Image (cartoon, rainbow, N blue to C red):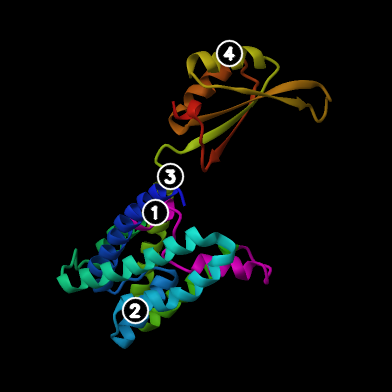
Amino acid sequence: MNFKTLKLIFIRMFWITIGTMIAAYSLECVLIPNEVIDGGIVGISIMASYLTKYPLGLFLIVLNLPFVLSAFQKFGKMFVFLMFYGVIALSLFSEMFLKTGHIFTQDTLLAAIFGGIILGTGVGLVLKNNASLDGTEILAINLAKKIPFSVGEIIMFFNIFIFILAGFVYEPNKAMYSAITYFIAYRVIDIVLQGLNEAKSVFVISSKYNEIGREIMKNLDKSVTYLNAEGGYSGAKSKMIYCVITKLEIQKIKETVNKIDPYAFIAIENVHDVDGKRYKK
């Protein structure tokens, strides 16, 4: 193992430590005191701790351990090591915050909202550094090979079952607050992973593609790519313009294209991840 690899591991461990500390604070100081839970293995661990009075950290380790081990072959040693480290760190920080006795708020709605924001931030930092705190995704990936459902559908069914169970362990209102927390945390995780500047891919079909392409490069300072295209009805061969922009530039590129060709076809799609020096510049 060379110095570069060791440096990468330590950097990831640092951010996983920060992420698990934030997530543990959300669990022990915001959500659990208000009987609001998260989804997945974390949610099951919270309910198991509530019913048995054993520490939350114990269930986080025990329930996640089978999934950590099952991930070894598919995800590799690095992922398994970082996930195991993350689960241990989350357990230790949970115990630490539990002993402080600090409670963020006693308003259940505020706890559900801000607990989701804080939890999503922590979990997002962990996921961004090639680790996980919950074995639900690993279980879903393994099950998706055996049953006719996608990974996303399996996770959804699993969490619906958990929130229904939470309605019996606590009360129906708490289960609904928990669903709010899960939804907010899910969206915040996306923001942490993708950033607020969500990229958009743009396709422009026009007979004036050369003029439009030059204008985009000049006015928006964006690199464009010309793709070969052929009309489905006419069979006429032409070029299609492709480029990647930020969501703040959507209106500007529409105005640029429509100024040159009001009849141009414009398609805009979300891009979940973009890399490249030109785009970042």
Q: Closer to us: mark 3 or mark 1?
A: 3
| Residue 155 placement (x, y as % from top left) | 53, 66
If the image is split into quadrants, where does the C terminus sit? top left
Q: Secondary structure at mark 3?
A: helix
Tell me whether circle 3 and circle 4 mark residues in contact (CB < 8 Å).
Answer: no
Are the residues tagged 4 and 1 within 8 Å (C-beta)?
Answer: no
* Span of residues in magenta: 122-150
Which numbered mark, 2 or 1, is in the foreground of this view? Answer: 2
Give the spatial CA distance, label 3 vs label 4: 42 Å
Residue type indicated by callout 2 = Leu
Q: Mark 3 against mark 2, which lies toward the viewer? A: 3
Task: Name the residue carrying label 1.
Answer: 124
* Kind of residue at badge 3: Lys
Q: CA–CA distance between discs 2 and 4? A: 61 Å
Image disc number at residue 214: 4
Q: Residue at x 35, y 69 (%)?
A: 88
Are the two marked residues, 3 and 2, in contact with CB atoms closer than 8 angstroms?
Answer: no
Q: Earlier in the sequence, mark 3 or mark 2?
A: 3
Q: Which residue is mark 2?
A: 58
Name which of mark 3 and mark 1 comes first in the sequence: 3
Alpha-carbon span between mark 4 and mark 1: 39 Å
Residue 154 visible in rendering: no
Q: Where does label 3 land, which residue? A: 4
Image height check: is 166 above or below 52?
above
- Residue 278: % across, % down: 50, 25
